[in-house]
Image (spheres, rainbow, N blue to C red):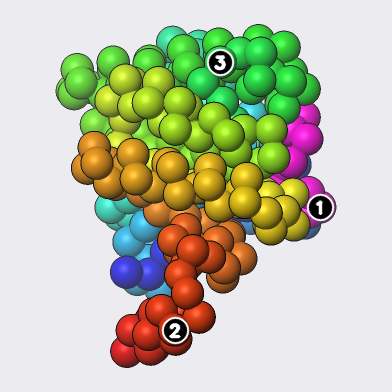
Amino acid sequence: MKIKILQIADKCNNNCRYCLNKKDDFLVDFAKIKKEISKGASMGCEQIVFCGKEPSLFAGFIELISEARNCGYKTIQVKTNARMFAYKDFCKNILRAGLTELSVHLYAADEVLHDSLTRSKGSFRQTIAGIKNVLYYSKKFFPYNSCSVNIGIMVCPENINFLKRIVKILSRLKTGQFFFIATGAINNMVDDRTCNGLRDVKKMLEKNNITYHTVGFLKDKKDFFKPYLSEKEKKVYNLIQQK
Ligand code: SF4
């Protein structure tokens, strides 16, 4: 499936220590963004992804979601910290406009750790409230669009030992699949602590049939078991991977 990705909005209401969106070439011209939306649709894209810094802060963002729906995209996704979704009116209006997927980034399942990594007091509470609002209004269907929520856990040295606990708590929200997103700091750490943390969470996810994906991990950490294979096993593993 062809996907149109638009990086809009150059501002964010968090100030994350491990922000992955530090570029400065975000689209900020409303008319240009609209044009890009229809260009993607005419090229046959069925999914559109709005990311940024924080796209929900972009003036006219709800109108852009309507535009995407009118252009015929089947999946309209936003990558967000979800803080804006804590405002019920914003949440209801964007669901009405046609949003179908929310991809939320979190660092922890408690406010002390999360807020310390976003360097924004109150961010954890707002993000959780945002997720809950989306899940609540989504269930109401008409006039609200049904919208799925995925959680992206930003894996970093501060949370590597707590991933299991984070997933356990956040899965109570009954969202969709989990994504584990590598920060640069975790990829620079090649030690037992990293591998044990990842291996632990992998076991737990599989035991509970929770769908998960990994994003941005260096090859050695992509398959969490790989560092524990013997040299002979690694060769067999590589052969299987190549097929
Ligand atoms: S919420 Fe996302 S864009 Fe905003 S500072 Fe954090 S990582 Fe960067």
User: Quadrant for ligand 1?
Assistant: top right
Give, as a single range, the part of the protein colored magenta: 13-24
Distance from mark 2 CB to nearest ligand 1 atom below 8 Å: no
Name the quadrant of the C terminus: bottom left
> Is residue 141 visible to the viewer in this orientation of the structure?
yes
Check disc 1 and report its element: helix, strand or loop: loop
Q: Residues within 10 Å of mark 3 (few under 14, many from 20)?
A: some
Question: Do the residues bearing badges 1 and 3 touch, measured as CB atoms within 8 Å?
Answer: no
Question: Do the residues bearing badges 2 and 1 touch, measured as CB atoms within 8 Å?
Answer: no
Q: Position of residue 111 (x, y in %)?
A: 61, 13
- Residue that carries the numbered disc 1 in the rendered image: 24
* CA separation in Å, label 1 and label 3: 31 Å
Q: Pick whichever of labels 1 and 3 is earlier in the sequence.
A: 1
- Residue that carries the numbered disc 3 in the rendered image: 110
Q: Which disc number belongs to residue 5? A: none
Q: Is residue 16 above or below residue 128?
A: below
Residue 70 falls left or right of residue 151: left
